[in-house]
Amino acid sequence: MDVLPLAILAAAAALGWNWWSDRRSADRATLLARQACEQAGVIWLDQNVQRVRKRLARDDDGRLAWRRDYDFEFTSSGEDRQLGRISLVGLRVVGLVGPAAVPLVYVRR
């Protein structure tokens, strides 16, 4: 049996799995960015996230997994753009830097 077709098939399967995994991770980061902006009461600009870094990292069980960092932009006033970042290992959130919820201050009169 020739090894070349099997190697090509394995490479195609690996590329497909990697693409599918990247899409799932990007969808999760998009959902998290939307939720963070809604909870903080800010405007999520461009309605998307962009992957800025992908590297190997250890998960909680000590196994190697992909760590992906995604950036997104938001504004509180409509005049400035602020940068937020979501870090995922697999589909688990390991970091979120972004909009902070505005504290509600109640003054009784």
Image: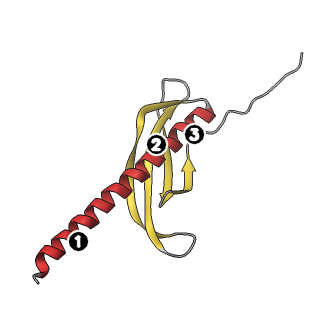
- Residue placed under numbered mark 1 in the picture: 10
Dot 2 or dot 1: first in sequence order is: 1
CA gap, disc 1 to disc 3?
Answer: 39 Å
Residue at image position (45%, 41%) is: 72
Dot 1 or dot 3: first in sequence order is: 1
- Residue placed under numbered mark 3 in the picture: 36
Residue at image position (34%, 55%) is: 20
Dot 3 or dot 2: first in sequence order is: 2
Farthest residue to the bottom: give it: 1
Q: Position of residue 84 (x, y in %)?
A: 50, 43
Q: Position of residue 82 (x, y in %)?
A: 49, 37
| Residue 68 in the figure: left or right of residue 11 | right
CA gap, disc 2 to disc 1?
Answer: 30 Å
State the image quarter where residue 8 is shown: bottom left
Q: Position of residue 12 (x, y in %)?
A: 21, 65
Residue at image position (78%, 28%) is: 105
Count the labels in the image. Answer: 3
Give the residue type that dot 3 points to.
Ala
Give the residue type that dot 2 points to.
Thr
State the image quarter where residue 54 is shown: bottom left
Q: Residues within 10 Å of mark 2 (few under 14, many from 20)?
A: many
Pick whichever, 81 or 106, lies toward us: 106
Which dot, 1 or 3, sits closer to the camera?
1
Pick whichever, 43 or 1, lies toward us: 1
The circle drawn on residue 30 is: 2
Q: Residues within 10 Å of mark 3 (few under 14, many from 20)?
A: many
Q: Residues within 10 Å of mark 1 (few under 14, many from 20)?
A: few
Residue at image position (31%, 56%) is: 19
Q: For mark 3, give the secondary structure.
A: helix
